[in-house]
Amino acid sequence: MDRMPAVSVVATVLNEVADIDRLLTSLMEQTLAPAEVVIVDGGSSDGTWERLQCAKTKYPTLIPIRDESCRLSQSPGPISRGRNVAIAAASSDVIACVDAGCAYEPEWLERLTTSIRSGESEYALGGSCIDPDERTVWDIASAPFFGVKLSADAKTKSCTARSVAFRKELWQRVGGFPEHLLLGEDTVFDLKVRALVTPTFAERAKAFYRPCHTLRSALGQLARYSLSDGVAGVRPARLLRNSSRGLLQIVAVLLFAACAMGRNLESDQGSDHESKPAQSAECQLA
């Protein structure tokens, strides 16, 4: 019986010192050990690169690469550029992509790549869910707008590059991730790949994502995603849906603020009415 092919895990990072150790630990504790973990640093200035260099002494399969062409000042699509550099450097026939800001269950890589390693598929999607250990109310509220699930068991067809695997040869056939796009690069990559092959949707192979959203950051990300879809000219239905949802969110926030102001005003007026009799009594006593 032929051995199943090895898997290389790849990521691109920039100034992720708060999350890089958590990501590396989860990748190095996989039940299916990756042949290598290739992480491209686009020129971090917060200590991320130093953390990667230190981790190299602990994890022999870690391959850190510093490439400052993988940043916005040098490339219109630094995320795609970083992924492409990492994949080009990887030695395995099967590639799995991960993202900073995420962690992965020990069985993640095995579950995600089973169909590819067995020869049943060339492309597998795992999706992502909000990390149950650290989430904000705005992470939960915004998750449906970004295709992020609230549970690791939920069904998903998300093409997010936080959890996706493919044969390296397939990546080459579609020309890699599109380096002319700042955002939405995984959507464009997915559309090109689906024109050639049918994806497998791996169960319980989600990235555990920690966006740590506030209301402002959630609305900002929604606006950026909608804009990127428009620039890329992909999935107009999703563009309309995201734009509509963004407007509805703004209206809902404004209505909530107006109601809160109204309640505060009523409360202040009530306090004024209650204080007037007390003041009159004081005058009579005087």
Image (tube, helix red, strand yellow):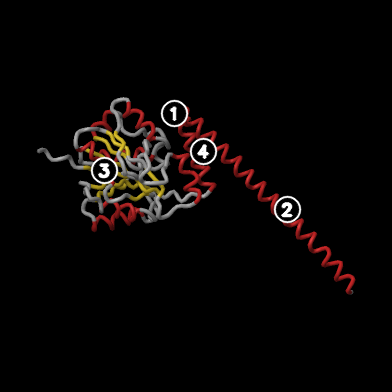
The residue mark sitting in front, 4 or 1, is 1
Q: First in sequence: mark 4 or mark 1?
A: 4
What is the crowding at mark 2: few (fewer than 14 residues within 10 Å), some, or many (at least 20)? Answer: few
The residue mark sitting in front, 1 or 3, is 3
> Which residue bears the numbered disc 3?
111
Q: Residue 178 carries which label?
A: none
The three-letter amino acid code for the residue at tag 4 is: Ala
In terms of secondary structure, where does tag 2 sit? helix
**In terms of depth relative to the viewer, which is nearer, 104 or 22?**
104
Q: Distance between the residues labelled 1 and 3?
A: 28 Å
**In terms of depth relative to the viewer, which is nearer, 57 or 4?**
4
The three-letter amino acid code for the residue at tag 1 is: Arg
The three-letter amino acid code for the residue at tag 2 is: Leu
> Which residue bears the numbered disc 2?
265
Percent coordinates x, y for residue 58 in the rendering: 24, 58
In terms of secondary structure, where does tag 4 sit? helix
The residue mark sitting in front, 2 or 1, is 2
Question: Can residue 42 be seen in the rendering of this structure?
Answer: no
The three-letter amino acid code for the residue at tag 3 is: Arg
Q: Reply above or below: 278 against 179.
A: below
Dots 1, 3 in contact, CB < 8 A: no
> Which residue bears the numbered disc 4?
223
* Residue at position x 31%, y 44% in the image: 205
> Which residue bears the numbered disc 1?
235
In terms of secondary structure, where does tag 1 sit? loop
Q: Distance between the residues labelled 2 and 1?
A: 45 Å
Dots 2, 4 in contact, CB < 8 A: no
Q: First in sequence: mark 1 or mark 3?
A: 3
Question: Can residue 125 be seen in the rendering of this structure?
Answer: yes
